[in-house]
Image: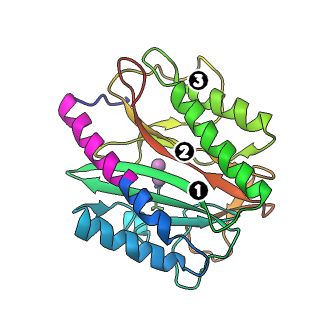
Amino acid sequence: MVNIKTATEIEKMRVVGALAAEQLEMIAEHITPGVSTGELDRICHRYTIDDQKATPAPLNYRGFPKSICTSVNHVVCHGIPSDEKILKDGDIINIDVTLIKDGFHGDTSKTFVVGTAGVLAERLTQVCKESLYLGIQAVKPGAYLGDIGAAIQTYVEKNRFSIVREYCGHGIGTVFHDEPQVLHYGKKGTGPELKSGMTFTIEPMINAGKREIKDGPEKDGWSIVTRDHSLSAQWEHTVLVTEQGYE
Ligand code: MF3
Ligand code: CO
Ligand code: CO
């Protein structure tokens, strides 16, 4: 069963969602050539605790060792920040932040370009962002979960990029990863019907090459990379179904 939030719960989702968004805005200026992903993690961790009075949800989640995920270039998702991983000009990096405030989760991510991007990196990042917004625009009461995936898939494949199938968006609230599973591909009119008061994430991961993935070479149990080593981008929002559509 997909749970429907009360007005009070929705207000808490709004608060934590805004904090998560502010954190992504805060970190932007720190993403420069020469910075390590470990340093970005420390900045976010401190900001979450000291300034936002919130909790970083990834830290110790199923054993995840850091407060944010940093996924660079061919890393699809769940990259673990480290002091050894130094960003260089032209890299792309997804920063995925999830905060907990007053018991509720806000989960958002975007792909940043480090310095000056190459043409392909820029296009992959933009198409991924646009696909997320097309998915969000499919959200309204009476629509179907499959409408979201269909909107994303149509656009991404028209641009000749591929969609990762193994990971999906998710219901979110007091639980980090809840029902339903929000696929980033699919057919219009399929899946559960959307109802006002549902909250879930949409978070397409798209690759410049083939869609297949594998575990990262570090064998850290988390980082996922493209099998063909092609670039991968991801964008994520936490979304509420409203009477009119979405928020
Ligand atoms: N924030 C990720 C998501 O979008 C989940 C990260 S789980 C972690 O669902 F443990 F890797 F942090
Ligand atoms: Co998520
Ligand atoms: Co996330």
N-terminal label among 3 and 2: 3
Q: Position of residue 247 (x, y in %)?
A: 39, 31
Q: Position of residue 212 (x, y in %)?
A: 75, 53
Q: What is the C-alpha distance between the residues marked 1 and 2?
A: 11 Å
Q: Position of residue 187 (x, y in %)?
A: 66, 23
Q: Quadrant of residue 165?
A: top right
Q: In this figure, which residue is indicated by the disc labeled 1? A: 111
* Mark 1 in CB contact with mark 2 (< 8 angstroms): no
Quadrant where the N terminus is found in the figure: top left
- Circle nearer the viewer, 3 or 1: 1
Query: What is the spatial separation of the Cα atoms under label 3 and label 1, in whole angstroms?
Result: 24 Å
Q: Is residue 69 above or below residue 138?
A: below
Q: Nearer the viewer, residue 44 or 212?
A: 44
Amino acid type at circle 2 is Glu
Residue nearest the observer in this picture, 29 or 209: 29
* Left or right placement of residue 125 versus residue 138 in this view: right
**Who comes first in sequence, dot 1 or dot 2?**
1
Asked if disc 2 is less than 8 Å from ligand 2, the answer is: yes
Q: Which residues are magenta?
A: 7-21
Q: Quadrant of residue 77?
A: bottom right
Callout 1: SS: strand
12 drawn magenta: yes
Q: Is residue 101 something that shows in the picture?
A: yes
Spatial CA distance of label 3 from label 2 is 15 Å
Q: Which mark is residue 147?
A: 3
Q: Which mark is residue 75?
A: none
Cβ–Cβ below 8 Å for labels 3 and 1? no
Residue that label 2 marks = 203
With 116 as the anchor, is 141 left or right in this view? left
Apparent side of residue 34 relative to residue 123 in the rendered image (left or right): left
Any part of residue 65 in sight: no
User: Percent x, y for residue 184?
Assistant: 61, 37
